[in-house]
Image (tube, grey):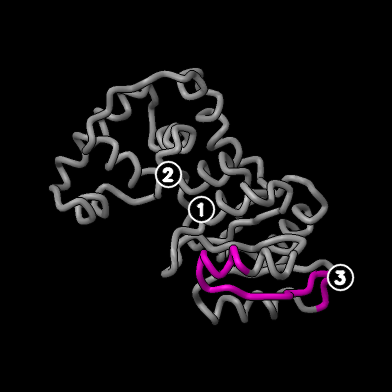
Amino acid sequence: MKKLLVVDDHEVIRHGVRVLLEDTDMEIVGEASTAADALSKVKSLSPDAVLLDIRMEGGDGLNALGRIKLDYPDLPIVLYSAYDNPTYIARAVALGASGYVLKSATRERLIEALGLALAGESAWTREELRRVTGALATPRLSADIEVPLTQRESEVLRQMALGLTNKEIAKMLGISYETVKEHVQHILRKIGVSDRTQAAVWAVRKNLV
């Protein structure tokens, strides 16, 4: 049996995954509800793979992904999210996740993704990779170029890379929606990219998130 750690801040989701994986060769050996708990459980339980939520009360799952990968670079981690968000997908690819499964996906898709990850293979779909390969291959993104972003632009970019919408960023930073839109346009122009997904990849590579 392959040992799996499930990380999600909703008990119903954790229980649901346990039911979905019944009669498979995967055994859930532990559950965690926060990013900090996930790091602790990875160390104590030595799972063969991790199924990791993104938006959690106890911290950003993508930050947890990055921290786990620093200590356990070969541990397969599959993101499990309710959000079909291109910036999340871009960050997950850049941080070394094995795949990304939506919570609306079928049981078969979840089992397939976990199986591929456990076998050391990529569980990314062609469509998911197509959405971010352009960003990952953009020359400007791979070049070590210093870009003169203002402090506010850096704050906006960080929130963009965390997957927040312009409206959410405006609320978070206490500025108007129109001001956020203006900052986003300036950021894209300055770093030489055409969309938020590419900006998210750039932010990851610059360690802004």
Q: Is residue 22 above or below residue 87?
A: below
Residue 87 position in % (x across, y down): 45, 44
Circle 2 sits on which residue?
209
Task: Name the element at disc 2.
Answer: loop
Residue 8 position in % (x across, y down): 54, 70
**Which is in the foreground here, disc 2 or disc 3?**
2
Circle 3 sits on which residue?
1
Tag 1–tag 3 contact (CB < 8 Å): no
User: Could you tell me how many numbered marks the image carries?
Assistant: 3
Quadrant in which the C terminus is drawn:
top left
Tag 1–tag 2 contact (CB < 8 Å): yes
**Disc 1 to disc 2, C-alpha distance:** 9 Å
Q: Which mark is residue 62?
A: 1
The numbered mark, 1 or 3, whose residue comes first in the sequence reads 3
Q: Quadrant of residue 137?
A: top right
Q: Answer whether residue 22 is magenta in the image.
A: no
Please name the residue shown 45% across and 38% down the image.
Answer: 207
Task: Name the element at disc 1.
Answer: helix
